[in-house]
Amino acid sequence: MFALLFVPVISRFVLIILFCGLFTGVAQAATQVPENQQQITLSFAPLVRKAAPAVVNIYTQTLVVERQVIPLFRDPFFRQFFGERFGRQLGRDRERVQNSLGSGVIVQNDGVIVTNNHVIEGADKIRVVLSDRREFDATIIGVDESTDLAVLKIEVPGEDLPFMEFRDSDDLLVGDLVIAIGNPFGVGQTVTSGIVSAVARSQVKVADVGSFIQTDAAINPGNSGGALISMDGRLAGINTAIFSNSGGSLGIGFAVPSNMVRFVVDGFVNSGSIVRPWLGAWGQPVTSDLVEVLGLDRPVGVLVNDLWPGGSAAIAGIEVGDVILGINGQDIYDANDLQFRIASLNVGGTATISLSRDNEPVELEVPLEQAPEVPERDLATLDNDSLLSGSVVANMSPALAEELRLSKFSPGVIILDIIRNTNAAYYRFQPGDLILELNDESVTSVDHLVQLTDNPPDINFISISRQGERYTLKVRQ
């Protein structure tokens, strides 16, 4: 606009005419009447027609036992004197059937279905309804709580079922069109469309291992376990959760990426279990305060601050102070993203890890090995007269930590269970407590703990770690 101030009057007049003509042409093009039938009938219908038969509705039934309280003891006067528990003890057990619903996706023509674990968790009966309204009982092949995924199987003899192929979810870009198919609110199979709003959302507290696809396609209760489909008709993810204050869609939905879904399905179908690689390295996200110190140009990656001796990371040469920036060419944004990338790879191979060390780029080949059970857990139940009597304990190891879904742990002895009406229950020890010291002596193993508790003194000092916090208890027996 400022350049026009220096153009002669006649030239400015000509330019104004040209600009007016140009804008008129654009306006006419924007409001142009469709010229053929194809321009009028552009639709997602062919894509939906192809994909929808592979999406199923899932109905579950769970038998719930409830204790009915005698009406007299619901009165606040009696509850004050007799307490809540007294009324329940005199009540009767009542059974009722709890129904819930969700969605699933057929991923193999022999009836293998993937859905969310929370859709079928605790169910006594699982019923699958196909898009053509046929119904079948389903069995559970495997459940992976870490990703909130479950793999089911239905038997349809002599028939190849329509199924959905997996897409490489790492190729998805923000802005890509996607379609969600599921059974929201139990109204029946429903299709919604939207775009990929974000990728690698690792702060969603839905599963232990997660780096979710975010979409604005309408997802509501009942959509869980349904398909998120890309424009090539392949499975991009499994719809898992929504962000909502009301329970309805606010345009923020999250899906487990198809690469992780494929890993879980292949593990259960081919070997009956999920075995994930274990890196043996822990760290913290790189914040803006650390960028300059670490010589980086932006706050991404994981600063390694601890290594397990003999773990894959230590064997490969990763050192404390390194910043992990990528795995197999995929950027790493934080510790959750690092865990997800490692967890979606197969044991037995290698991974290329890109990192920054002393402001210099380094690439290392890391062996992908499962978490070792070293030392062996040596499961034991303490049945002596100590304050820990009634606790079931084991030696902590990387394999046990993975089984307990602990992202960070320390070596030592952990309590796995507490038997009711025992000393351990009375002193309110809990499963997950890590026993650090007993009477000023560090506890190194289950055998060591048994020796320390065989002849307990009159006064016991015990230190435990609970959810990262250290507690010390003094007990006179």
Image: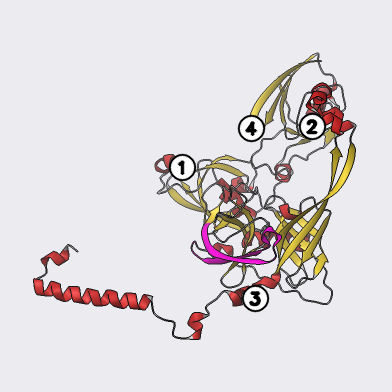
98 w.r.t. 67: above or below: below
Mark whose residue sits in front, 3 or 4:
3
- Of labels 3 and 2, earlier in sequence is 3
Looking at the rendering, in which quadrant would you find the N terminus? bottom left
- Three-letter amino acid code of the residue under disc 2: Val
At label 4, the amino acid type is Gly
User: In this figure, which residue is indicated by the disc labeled 3?
Assistant: 50
Classify mark 3: helix, strand or loop: helix
Q: Nearer the viewer, mark 4 or mark 2?
A: 4
10 and 178: which is toward the camera: 10
Question: Is 179 covered by the magenta stretch?
Answer: yes
Q: CA distance from mark 3 to mark 4?
A: 50 Å
Disc 1 marks which amino acid? Thr
Crowding near pointer 1: few (<14 within 10 Å), some, many (20+)? Answer: some
Read off the residue under disc 4.
Answer: 468
Given contact means CB atoms under 8 Å apart, are the residues at marks 2 and 1 in contact? no
Measure the alpha-carbon separation of dots 4 and 2: 21 Å
Q: Based on the picture, tell me whether residue 437 belongs to the magenta stretch.
A: no
Instruction: State which tag comes first along the sequence, 4 or 2.
Output: 2
